[in-house]
Structure formats: structure tokens, C-alpha cells
């Protein structure tokens, strides 16, 4: 017969009882009966909860009651009042009611059925760490069981470990002695592996390359200075090998002296890509996979293991470690690289390390900078000794703006200097059309220098272009003309273009891709480099392009000193970089493009 809806209730027609039901029960009587049944059910449910909460208070092991019954959601208000009277806490998470002895948070991910599930992939470094811990446990068990024999070329000894588990003090002594023997065994193994690599054909070839670096000539002097001083400041030109070689010199020296397993070196880098690229290079020079004796650790990513004794990381990672380990126990050397890049993390790290040095007299701190302003940091650490490493004497020819205009034949006008930021940033493009009412100090100095300079040796076209030059613009069109000139008339080699930020990089990249020459992937490989990019994309800048393809890299000032790209031949610098300034009107910090310093300009040339 089907189901007939009737005022929100469902009446099932029946030949015998349908008329009787319609006559005997009205709507009010039915609703009253339903409410009475619901009330009796609620009372029974509350009594059941009262019994559950009483058991919870008596049981010391249980901490909470979790229920998914729909009756509990209906009666939650009464359950919550009951919990308060009994001194408990209650919370309802969606379809789950919880009563607890301790305060409950506003959200419980373990009780959220709608929370998306994802597959977690264990990193290779973590797998190696687990394997190393298991192997270390087996080594300890082997040493604790009885006699252990150590064999090496120049060290053979047999040690008997006695069972002294009767006293607590003896247990701790056994642990220290066993651990020391494990480290000695590991040190001998590390020395044998290092000697084997250095004597191999690949190792000799790599060693010959390392000897060609300027830092190799200062190796003994650097090792002696680090051994005799707790703090040392080292400055060196770009490409001299200070970042890749100095930590490696210490590690090799400790391994050769049989203390490799007792040595632990941390080298901080200002950027993620620097830590990853340097660690890959150093591990390749040591002839071993990344994550063995050399590893890296950056935010949300890392590759290191139990046998890692040289770790490259960002400044933030070391600060995070100092939160839990203020004395850096187990660390023997700390390298702080690129200290000239003054940032909040870097400056605060130096403050913390300065306070740490009196407590850790055995800790060695090495500060490295790519510029010659090392005296400032030396004075901060009570006159720490300074060592300068010269760089390669490559001939560098600088072309300034007037030289570029004369060389390319490009003519500047008030309109072709306007940078195109696309339709979404039309306001930024139009802003360049509005002349500034007030000139800044840099613009005034530039105009005075141009008026006093003599450009008689340049063509009238170049002199007219200089008169029309607008310093506030980046000059996308001029950069495009320079790149076209390099691709058509200059010798092969990669080009590095320094821009102010990601917005300028992306807009210039889109403009270059639309060019018939620069946008041809068979002739030009266009890459970008920015700190916010994915690691896999950043690594592409280190790879060499195919034959007859010129690599062009658009980068920020992170490529100034943090990384070294071997095949760079040409550098185009717009002379500006974004720096953090303070907006007094809005009371907020902001990033604004500003002219770079002479030290930065000199760093770009080197």
C-alpha cells in the first residue's frame, strides 16, 4: 500500500487498524507520547553518563571518555553540566562527545573523520638514521657481551669489557667506556675509507682540482689558527673555496688523526639552496653519497644520518637546536658563513654563540665572509684574529651604462624605459608615467655627476640617451637589448642577470619568452633563481645547457655570494636590490628596491 505522509509522521495504512488509529490518537497525543519517551531516554542516558564519569574518576589510568552515540549529541548540554558538577571537562567534536580529566582543546585531529588522510614517505636520511641507531645498538651489545677485537693498519688492540651491572655507578661507567670504544672503531673505519678514496684515480683527480683553489695554499695556516684560537674571522673572494674547503679541511684532519667520530661540524648558510648545493659538492669531493659523513638540514627537508659529521644547515635550523640544547653538546666546530648578509637570524645567532663560548671552551667558532668588512665582526668577538684568502685573478671588464648604450646602440626615451608588469599590475606600470615631485638624494647625485662628466668620446645617440635616463625604472627593454647583443655577438657562456625580486623576475621572463631570439628554447635556456622557488627548480641553474644553447639566469642578490655557478661568463646588474625598510605612515615594515652598496657591486664583479 505504500507509506502515506501525515503531518511529519508516517502512518502505515492497514485494513484492520487504520481506522482505529485515526480515531483513537490525535496529533497532540502522539507528540506528547513521543516527548515523554524522549525524556525518559535522556534521563536513562544521563544516568549512564553519571555512572561512566564516576568510574573515570576512580580509575587512575584512564584520562577520558569518548562516545560517538547520537544520543550523547542530543543530550550534550546536560552531559556538559554534569561534567562540570563532577569536576570534569567536556567537549563535542562534530559527532564525538568527550569527557576528560584535563582541559580539552578546541580541535582534536584524531577525532576528525573529515580530516584528509595522506601517505607519508619516510625520507632517505631518516631511514639511514634508523639503520644507524640499530647498528649502534648491535655494536653496544657485542661490546657488552665480552671480548671485542679492533683491527687496522696501525692499531690492533683487544679489550675485555667486564660485567659491572651490580652497581649503578658502574653501569654509567660501562656506557661511557663502551661508547668510547664504538667511536674509536668508527674513527678507524673512517680513516681507512678516506685513505682509500684519496688513493683512487677519481680521488686523485678531485684532489688535484682542490689543490688549484686559492684556499689550499692557506690550509696549514688556517688549521693552525683554528686550533689555537676559539674564534677566527676569515674573509675571501668569491670562488676561493672557503665554503666548501675549510670545513672539509678540519674534517679530514680530524679523521686522519683518528678522531673523526669525535668530530662534529655545523656550517650555517643564509639560504636553503646554499646549504643543499654546498653539501652535494662536498660529498662529491669526498667520493661518497650525500647523507653519509656530509649532510644537510633545512626547513622541512634534510639528508643526514648517524655517521654525519659535517652538517650544512640554515641559520634558523641551528637556532632551533639551541632552543633544546643551549650548550651544543657534541658539536666541536661551528662555521657561520656569509656573515656580511646581515639578517635577523644571523645577527641573533652571533649573539647567542658569543654567550655560549665562555661555557664551551672547547668549541671552535669560524666566521666567514665574502667581503673585506671582517673587522666589524672581529671587534665584536674581542679582537678575534682575521685571515684573508685571495681569489682567482680573472680579468673582469666592466661596462657601465654609457658603455652599454654605446655598445648596443640602444636609444633611451621617456617611454621605452617604462617596465611592463602586465594587465594585473597595470597600476604599477602607469605609476612610472607620473613624474616624481621630489627627487631623492641618489637621483640628485646621479644627475650632478652626469652634468659634470664629459662624454665627448661617446656618440650623440648615447649622450641623448643618458640625458633621458630615468633612474627609478629597472629597464626591462634595455636588459633585453643587452641580452640580444650578448647572444648575437659575444662568445659562448652563461649570463647571470641580477633583478630586485620575484615580481620583476617573472615579468622580465615573460617578456623575454615573447622575443623571437631569447624565447627560442633551441638557442636560449631561460632559468630563474629565487629563494621561494622549489628546490628542484633551483638546482637547474647548476646544470650545463646543451651544445649551442646559451643559459640565461634571472636571479636576485642571493646569487651574489651564497652560490657559485661555474659557467657564468657575463653578468648584467641593474644596480638595485630590495631591502627591508620601515613605513612610518602605516607602521609596518616593507620591501622596497634601493641602490646596492659599493661592497655589493664589487662582490658582483668578483
Image (cartoon, helix red, strand yellow):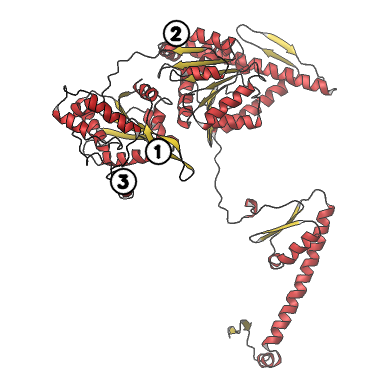
Which residue in the protein does label 2 denote? 217
Select label 1 or label 2 by which is in front. 1
Which quadrant is home to the N terminus? bottom right
Q: Is residue 53 above or below residue 183?
A: below
Q: Nearer the viewer, residue 604 or 89?
A: 604
In front: 269, or 281? Answer: 269
Q: Is residue 98 visible?
A: no
Identify the mark at residue 353; answer none if there is no mark: none
Q: Residues within 10 Å of mark 2 (few under 14, many from 20)?
A: few
Q: Mark 1 = which residue? A: 592
Identify the residue at image location x=82%, y=49%. 60
- Look at the picture and state if 22 lies above or below 486: below
Q: CA distance from mark 3 to mark 2?
A: 54 Å
Q: Is residue 209 left or right of residue 331?
A: left
According to the picture, the residue beneath numbered tag 3 turns out to be 431
Query: What residue is shown at x 45% (from left), y 14% (from top)?
Result: 203
The part of the image, by quadrant, that contains residue 188 is: top right
Mark 1 and mark 2: Cα distance apart in space: 42 Å
Amino acid at each position: 500500500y505504500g507509506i502515506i505522509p501525515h503531518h511529519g509522521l508516517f502512518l502505515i495504512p492497514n485494513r484492520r487498524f487504520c481506522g482505529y488509529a485515526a480515531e483513537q490518537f490525535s496529533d497532540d497525543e502522539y507528540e506528547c507520547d513521543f516527548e515523554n519517551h524522549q525524556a525518559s531516554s535522556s534521563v536513562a542516558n544521563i544516568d549512564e553518563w553519571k555512572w561512566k564519569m564516576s568510574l573515570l574518576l576512580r580509575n587512575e589510568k584512564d584520562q577520558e571518555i569518548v562516545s560517538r552515540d547520537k544520543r550523547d549529541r542530543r543530550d550534550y548540554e546536560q552531559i556538559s553540566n554534569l561534567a562540570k558538577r563532577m569536576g570534569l571537562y567536556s567537549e563535542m567534536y562534530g559527532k564525538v562527545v568527550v569527557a576528560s580529566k584535563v582541559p580539552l582543546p578546541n580541535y582534536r585531529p584524531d577525532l576528525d573523520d573529515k580530516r584528509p588522510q595522506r601517505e607519508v614517505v619516510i625520507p632517505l636520511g631518516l631511514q639511514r638514521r634508523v639503520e644507524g641507531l640499530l647498528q649502534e645498538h648491535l655494536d653496544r651489545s657485542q661490546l657488552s657481551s665480552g671480548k671485542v677485537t679492533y683491527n687496522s693498519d696501525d692499531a690492533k688492540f683487544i679489550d675485555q669489557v667486564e660485567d659491572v651491572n651490580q652497581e649503578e655507578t658502574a653501569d654509567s661507567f660501562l656506557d661511557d667506556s663502551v661508547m668510547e670504544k664504538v667511536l674509536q672503531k668508527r674513527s678507524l673505519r673512517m680513516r681507512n675509507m678516506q685513505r682509500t678514496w684519496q688513493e683512487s684515480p677519481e680521488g686523485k683527480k678531485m684532489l688535484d682540482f682542490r689543490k688549484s683553489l686559492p684556499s689550499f695554499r692557506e690550509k696549514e695556516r688556517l688549521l693552525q689558527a683554528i686550533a689555537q684560537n676559539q674564534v677566527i674571522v676569515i674573509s675571501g673572494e668569491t670562488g676561493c673555496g672557503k665554503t666548501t674547503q675549510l670545513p672539509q679541511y678540519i674534517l679530514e684532519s680530524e679523521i686522519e688523526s683518528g678522531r673523526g667520530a669525535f668530530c662534529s661540524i655545523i656550517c650555517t648558510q643564509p639560504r636553503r639552496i646554499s646549504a643543499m648545493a654546498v653539501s652535494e659538492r662536498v660529498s662529491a669531493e669526498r667520493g661518497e653519497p650525500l647523507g653519509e659523513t656530509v649532510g644537510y638540514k633545512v626547513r622541512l627537508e634534510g639528508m643526514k644520518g648517524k655517521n654525519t659529521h659535517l652538517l650544512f644547515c640554515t641559520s634558523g635550523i641551528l637556532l632551533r637546536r639551541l632552543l633544546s640544547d643551549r650548550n651544543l653538546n657534541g658539536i666541536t666546530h661551528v662555521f657561520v658563513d656569509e656573515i656580511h648578509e646581515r639578517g635577523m637570524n644571523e645577527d641573533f645567532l652571533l649573539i647567542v654563540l658569543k654567550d655560549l663560548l665562555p661555557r664551551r671552551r672547547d668549541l671552535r667558532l669560524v666566521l666567514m665572509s665574502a667581503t673585506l668588512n671582517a673587522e666589524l665582526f672581529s671587534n665584536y668577538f674581542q679582537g678575534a684574529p682575521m685571515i684573508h684568502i685571495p681569489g682567482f685573478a680573472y680579468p673582469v671588464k666592466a661596462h657601465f651604462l654609457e658603455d652599454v648604450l654605446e655598445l648596443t646602440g640602444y636609444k633611451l626615451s621617456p617611454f621605452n624605459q617604462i617596465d611592463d608588469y602586465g594587465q594585473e599590475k597595470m597600476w604599477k606600470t602607469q605609476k612610472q608615467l607620473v613624474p616624481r615631485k621630489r627627487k631623492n638624494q641618489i637621483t640628485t647625485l646621479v644627475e650632478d655627476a652626469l652634468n659634470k662628466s664629459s662624454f665627448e668620446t661617446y656618440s650623440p645617440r648615447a649622450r641623448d640617451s643618458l640625458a633621458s635616463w630615468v633612474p627609478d625604472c629597472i629597464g626591462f627593454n634595455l636588459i633585453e637589448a643587452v641580452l640580444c647583443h650578448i647572444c648575437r655577438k659575444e662568445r659562448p657562456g652563461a649570463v647571470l642577470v641580477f633583478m630586485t625580486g620575484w615580481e620583476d623576475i617573472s615579468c622580465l621572463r615573460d617578456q623575454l619568452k615573447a622575443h623571437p631570439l631569447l624565447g627560442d628554447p633551441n638557442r636560449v635556456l631561460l632559468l630563474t633563481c629565487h629563494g621561494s622557488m622549489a628546490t628542484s627548480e633551483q638546482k637547474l641553474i647548476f646544470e650545463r645547457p646543451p651544445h649551442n644553447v646559451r643559459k640565461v639566469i634571472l636571479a636576485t642578490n642571493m646569487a651574489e655570494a651564497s652560490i657559485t655557478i661555474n659557467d657564468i661568463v657575463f653578468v648584467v646588474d641593474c644596480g638595485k636590490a630590495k631591502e627591508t625598510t620601515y613605513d612610518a605612515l602605516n607602521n609596518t615594515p616593507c620591501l622596497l628596491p634601493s641602490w646596492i652598496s659599493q661592497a655589493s657591486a664589487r662582490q658582483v664583479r668578483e
